[in-house]
C-alpha cells in the first residue's frame, strides 16, 4: 500500500474506516493535535493515545507507511509546508550567522537544564570504574561514537567502537564483569541499538545512554540516561526531519561528560605518559 502524493492528514482521513478501533485513537490524536504528535516519539504518542507502541506502528503500516518514523518525517514536512509562507515573510533583525550561533548556544544551554548534574557524575564514575567501554552507535551517529571512543582512549580508558552492528554485538556478547555499554541514539528507537542493549541487560552489563528521547525504547534499558534533548517544557513542534542529520546536541553531551570526568578524576601518571608517547609519534605529521 502506498501513500501517494497525499499528506499525512489526507492519508489518515482516506483510510480511517479501514483501520482498527485502537488504531483510530492514534489517528484521532494526530489529526487533532498534529504539532504535539510530531513532537512525540513512538512511546510518547502511544502513551497520550492510550495504546501500545505496537498499535502506533501497526496504524502507520495500515495506512501505507513503513512505520512511525516515516510517518513522523512526512508529518514534519506537512506542518513545515503549512507554516512556510509565514516563515518566509518574517523579517529577522539579526544576521543569519548571528542567529544560527545564538540558536545553537540556546540549545546547548537548554540541554544542560534538561539534565541533572548527579547523572553526569554517575556516568563519569561508571567510566572511571569500568574495565572496558563498549560504544554502540549506528547510521550517521556512528562517527559520534568513534569520536567518543578516541577521546576516551586518549584519556586512558579502554574501549571498543565500530559502526557495524555485527562487530559491537560480538563485543557485548564477549563482555566481562566490569565492562559497560555506552549507547548513542538520537531517536531512541534504533532497532540495532535496542537489540545490543537487550543483550547487555541479558549479560548483566550496565548501560549508559545518550538519547534525544528520554521516554523511548532505548531509555528503558539504560541504567544512566544523559538526554541530548533541547526541548523546553511545553514546547511544541520540536521535531524536524532535517535535525536528524546533525549531532551538535549529542556532541555537546559527550564533551561535557568528558570535561566533568577530567575534572573529577584527571589522568593517572601512567595514562599521561602513554598519551604523551602517541602524541610524539603523530607530531611528525603536523607542521
Image: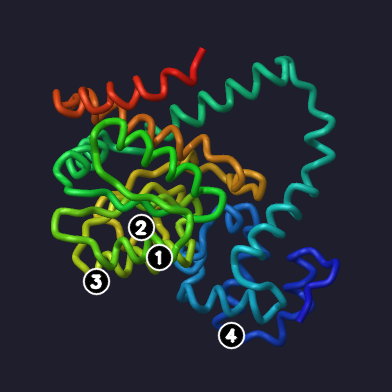
The mark closer to the camera, 2 or 3, is: 3
The location of residue 110, given as percent across then percent down, is: 44, 32
Q: Earlier in the sequence, mark 3 or mark 1?
A: 1
- The residue tagged 4 is 21
- Relative to 205, residue 240 above or below: above
The location of residue 158, given as percent across then percent down, is: 25, 43
Q: Earlier in the sequence, mark 3 or mark 4?
A: 4
Q: How many marks?
A: 4
- The residue tagged 2 is 219
Residue under the point 61% across and 71% down: 67
As drawn, the residue found furthest toward the top would be 287
Pointers 2 and 3 in contact (CB under 8 A)?
Answer: no
- The residue tagged 1 is 194
The quarter of the picture where residue 52 lies is bottom left
Answer with left or right where residue 214 lies relative to residue 264.
Answer: right
Dot 1: within a 10 Å radius of its alpha carbon, few (fewer than 14), some, or many (20 or more) residues? some
Q: CA distance from mark 3 to mark 4?
A: 36 Å
* Mark 1 secondary-structure assignment: helix
Q: CA distance from mark 3 to mark 1?
A: 12 Å
The mark closer to the camera, 3 or 4, is: 3
Q: CA distance from mark 1 to mark 2?
A: 9 Å
Residue under the point 50% across and 54% down: 187
Amino acid at each position: 500500500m502506498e501513500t501517494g502524493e497525499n499528506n499525512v492528514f489526507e492519508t489518515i482521513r482516506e483510510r480511517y474506516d479501514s483501520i482498527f478501533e485502537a488504531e483510530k485513537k492514534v489517528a484521532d490524536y494526530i489529526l487533532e493535535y498534529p504539532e504535539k504528535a510530531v513532537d512525540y516519539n513512538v512511546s510518547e504518542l502511544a502513551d497520550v493515545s492510550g495504546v501500545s507502541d505496537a498499535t502506533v506502528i501497526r496504524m502507520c503500516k495500515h495506512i501505507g507507511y513503513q512505520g512511525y518514523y516515516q510517518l513522523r518525517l512526512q508529518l514534519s514536512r506537512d506542518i513545515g509546508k503549512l507554516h512556510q509562507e509565514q516563515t518566509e515573510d518574517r523579517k529577522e533583525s539579526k544576521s543569519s550567522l548571528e542567529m544560527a550561533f545564538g540558536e545553537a548556544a540556546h540549545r546547548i544551554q537548554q540541554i544542560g537544564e534538561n539534565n541533572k548534574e548527579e547523572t553526569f557524575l554517575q556516568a563519569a564514575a561508571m567510566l572511571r570504574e569500568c574495565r572496558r567501554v563498549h560504544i554502540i552507535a549506528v547510521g550517521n551517529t556512528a562517527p559520534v561514537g568513534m569520536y567518543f571512543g578516541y577521546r576516551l582512549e586518549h584519556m586512558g580508558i579502554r574501549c571498543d567502537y565500530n559502526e557495524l552492528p555485527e562487530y559491537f554485538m560480538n563485543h557485548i556478547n564477549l563482555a566481562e564483569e566490569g565492562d559497560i555499554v555506552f549507547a548513542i541514539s538520537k531517536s531512541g528507537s534504533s532497532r540495532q541499538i535496542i537489540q545490543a542493549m537487550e543483550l547487555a541487560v541479558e549479560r548483566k552489563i550496565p548501560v549508559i545512554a545518550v538519547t534525544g528521547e528520554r521516554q523511548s525504547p532505548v531509555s528503558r534499558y539504560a541504567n544512566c540516561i544523559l538526554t541530548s534533548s533541547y526541548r523546553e517544557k511545553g514546547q511544541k513542534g520540536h521535531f524536524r526531519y532535517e535535525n536528524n542529520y546533525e549531532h551538535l546536541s549529542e556532541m555537546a553531551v559527550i564533551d561535557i561528560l568528558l570535561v566533568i570526568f577530567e575534572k573529577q578524576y584527571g589522568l593517572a601518571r601512567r595514562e599521561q605518559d602513554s598519551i604523551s608517547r602517541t602524541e610524539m609519534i603523530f607530531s611528525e605529521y603536523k607542521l
